[in-house]
Image (cartoon, rainbow, N blue to C red):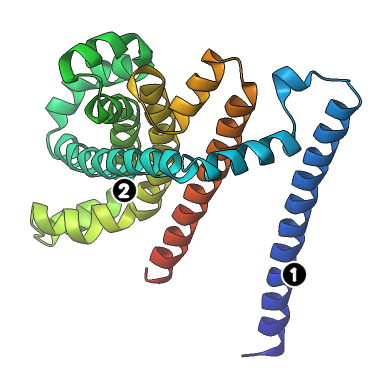
């Protein structure tokens, strides 16, 4: 490795460290300011809680053996919905790419379903599936699946036309074109759809838990609202923020590993 390469890698590492330090400072600064404003009475502790109250609430939930159960239930629902959304989205996007006429027929309906507020379908979902985990997963699927289909399908359409014509000229079969050109050329788009899908899945799961769950972070938030204990509500919101960040980081790690092999 040359001296210039070593300097470049060192500079990249330093930049990553600087970004991480700045993020930590911003987070700590936000928490400190939040705590001070509550203690000084500038903002209502009843409505906005405070970092110290949230910490005490987490300890209370742990002591009551509820904390990890709520997190586990929500993560399980997110994982199932995410895998189903990505898998179905990929397969349907492939079908639409292969059958252009079908894609043209379905396109306006996909747009319509994507813009439809899914919470409006909540009562129908509950009646059809019952007040259980099936309703939550279906709610999450309704939210993440359309986004996955549209994102992955547009990635397939973005394949270089000249390379596609070259493959066809050389006599490549449809299977070879898909597996050796279309899908490999769309890796970054597919991974980008993962990022969108995990965010949409978390939103869908929480919406489903608002409607039917008896456990999970969404239930914790609803329960806090019902008993006017907004510490539970703020604790749930903070936990959702942490979970969404962890899931996002996992997708980034997956992205980096996959791109190294390309």
Which residue is drawn at the image coordinates 47% and 61% (left, top)? 253
* Residue 177 left/right relative to 25: left
Residue 198 occupies which quadrant of the picture?
top left
Please tell me which residue lies in front, 136 or 258: 136
The quadrant the N terminus occupies is bottom right
Which numbered dot is residue 132? none
Mark 2 lies on residue: 159
Write down the residue under mark 1.
14
Q: Is mark 1 on a helix, strand or loop?
A: helix
17 is higher (above) or lower (below) than 178: below
Q: How crowded is mark 2: few (under 14 residues within 10 Å), some or many (20 or more)?
A: some
Q: Which residue is drawn at 50% across and 40% down?
A: 64
Q: Nearer the viewer, residue 170 or 39?
A: 39
Upstream in the sequence, badge 2 or badge 1? 1
Residue 31 vertical position relative to residue 104 in the rendered view, above or below: below
Task: Report, in whole angstroms, how far the alpha carbon at label 2 lies from the one at label 1.
Answer: 36 Å
Crowding around mark 1 (Cα neighbors within 10 Å: few <14, some 14 to 19, many 20+) is: few
Task: Report the front residue among 68 and 195.
Answer: 68
- Seen at 43% across and 70% down, the residue is 260
- 135 above or below 148? above
- Residue at point 71% right, 18% down? 47
Q: Which element type, helix, strand or loop, lies under badge 2?
A: loop
**Where residue 53 sits: x, y (%)?**
71, 34
Total marks shown come to 2
**Relative horizontal placement of residue 80, taking residue 211 as reference (left or right):** left
Q: Quadrant of the C terminus?
A: bottom left
Image position, residue 215 (x, y; %)? 38, 31
Residue 230, position as x, y percentages in the image:
63, 21
Residue lying farthest front?
Answer: 64
Residue 14 in picture, x, y percent from top left: 75, 69
Is 214 positioned to the left or the right of 2 in the image? Answer: left
């Amino acid at each position: 490795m040359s001296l210039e390469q070593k300097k470049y890698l060192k500079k990249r590492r330093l930049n990553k460290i600087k970004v991480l330090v700045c993020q930590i400072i911003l987070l700590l600064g936000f928490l400190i300011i939040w705590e001070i404003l509550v203690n000084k009475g500038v903002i209502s502790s009843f409505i906005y809680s405070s970092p110290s109250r949230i910490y005490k609430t987490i300890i209370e939930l742990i002591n009551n053996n509820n904390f990890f159960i709520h997190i586990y239930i929500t993560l399980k629902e997110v994982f199932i919905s995410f895998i189903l959304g990505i898998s179905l989205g990929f397969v349907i996007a492939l079908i639409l790419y292969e059958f252009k006429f079908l894609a043209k027929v379905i396109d306006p309906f996909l747009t319509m379903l994507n813009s439809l507020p899914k919470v409006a379908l909540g009562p129908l979902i509950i009646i059809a599936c019952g007040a259980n985990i099936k309703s939550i997963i279906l709610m999450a699927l309704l939210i993440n699946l359309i986004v996955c289909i549209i994102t992955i399908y547009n990635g397939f359409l973005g394949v270089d036309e000249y390379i596609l014509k070259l493959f066809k000229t050389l006599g490549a079969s449809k299977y070879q074109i898909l597996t050796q050109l279309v899908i490999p050329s769309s890796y970054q788009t597919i991974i980008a759809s993962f990022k969108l899908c995990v965010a949409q899945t978390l939103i869908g799961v929480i919406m489903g838990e608002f409607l039917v769950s008896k456990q999970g972070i969404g239930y914790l938030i609803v329960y806090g609202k019902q008993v006017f204990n907004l510490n539970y509500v703020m604790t749930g919101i903070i936990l959702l923020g942490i979970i969404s960040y962890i899931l996002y980081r996992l997708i980034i790690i997956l992205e980096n590993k996959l791109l190294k092999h390309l």
